[in-house]
């Protein structure tokens, strides 16, 4: 059975970077957190907001070129975060929930997440009338292949940022699980303000489902599959038959 990702603590002892596997049943002094971890937390919590606002400054309306720039910068941010984990913190990817479960279990739990998220999102979208604003119209004008890539990126990068890294590292610096999941969740939800109050509400509820599953299973691959699948159903599948 793989070691739980939540047990890995990025610490610094005698100014030498090292990783100490702390046993949850033993008392320990509070670790000195690496600068790389703080940098990673800033990147995971705010990179998506900074990228989107930077792109919007030059392209106030979503266009093909704007979408390409945005997606490229977000993937670069994700690669940078992985570099921070492996080279800055010198921690394994299991420390963010990657490789902690068998592939078939990740797929099955990912489908469970997708069903739960799709049910909740469908009800909220029907109640709020979400999906008929100018932002949605601009998004739907993009080529279907690009929308598909955006959906893939959302499932991978948003879960890497707001669930895998943020939750694990906020716990590593001493926060309780509820706070470690709640802080990224609020930032994630408020980051959808461009879609209006309805989009914030939907992001909050679906993000809460994803965060709860992550805290329970510590399986980031399942979260990525679930997130990507529900976005595919909502944004790509209808256009395949239109």
Image (cartoon, rainbow, N blue to C red):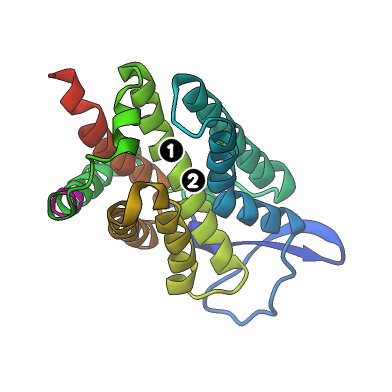
Compared with 181, 63 (above or below) is above
The picture places residue 140, in percent across and down from the top left corner, at 29, 27
Seen in the image, is 82 located left or right of residue 101?
right
Viewer-proximal residue among 167 and 195: 195
* Residue located at (27% from left, 36% from top): 229
Viewer-proximal residue among 242 and 12: 242
Task: Specify whether residue 175 is painted magenta.
Answer: no
Compared with 154, 101 (above or below) is below
* Residue 42 location, quadrant: bottom right
* Residue located at (59% from left, 31% from top): 58
For marks 2 and 1, give the CA distance: 6 Å
State the residue position of label 1.
156
* SS at circle 2: helix
Q: Residues within 10 Å of mark 2 (few under 14, many from 20)?
A: many
* Residue located at (44% from left, 55% from top): 188
Compared with 171, 230 (above or below) is above
Number of marks in the image? 2
Seen in the image, is 160 located left or right of residue 12?
left
The picture places residue 154, in percent across and down from the top left corner, at 41, 38
Say whether marks 2 and 1 touch (CB < 8 Å): yes
Viewer-proximal residue among 102 and 114: 114
Can you tell which mark lies on residue 63?
Answer: none
Q: Which residues are magenta?
A: 121-125
Can you tell which mark lies on residue 160?
Answer: 2
Seen in the image, is 16 located left or right of residue 188?
right
């Amino acid at each position: 059975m793989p070691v739980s990702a939540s047990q890995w603590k990025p610490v610094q002892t005698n100014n030498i970077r090292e990783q100490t596997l702390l046993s949850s049943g033993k008392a320990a002094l509070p670790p000195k957190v690496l600068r790389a971890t703080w940098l990673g937390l800033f990147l995971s919590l705010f990179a998506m907001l900074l990228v989107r606002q930077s792109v919007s400054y030059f392209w106030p309306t979503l266009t093909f070129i704007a979408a390409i720039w945005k997606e490229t910068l977000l993937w670069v941010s994700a690669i940078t975060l992985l570099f921070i984990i492996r080279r800055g913190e010198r921690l394994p990817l299991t420390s963010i929930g990657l490789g902690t479960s068998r592939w078939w279990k990740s797929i099955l739990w990912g489908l469970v997440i997708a069903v739960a998220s799709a049910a909740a999102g469908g009800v909220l979208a029907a109640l709020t009338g979400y999906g008929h604003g100018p932002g949605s119209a601009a998004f739907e004008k993009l080529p279907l292949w690009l929308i598909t890539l955006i959906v893939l990126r959302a499932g991978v990068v948003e879960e890497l940022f707001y669930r895998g890294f943020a939750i694990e590292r906020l716990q590593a610096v001493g926060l309780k699980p509820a706070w470690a999941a709640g802080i990224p969740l609020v930032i994630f939800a408020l980051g959808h303000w461009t879609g209006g109050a309805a989009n914030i509400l939907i992001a909050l509820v679906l993000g809460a489902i994803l965060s709860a599953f992550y805290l329970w299973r510590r399986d980031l691959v399942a979260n990525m599959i679930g997130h990507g699948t529900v976005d595919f159903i909502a944004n790509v599948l209808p256009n395949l038959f239109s």
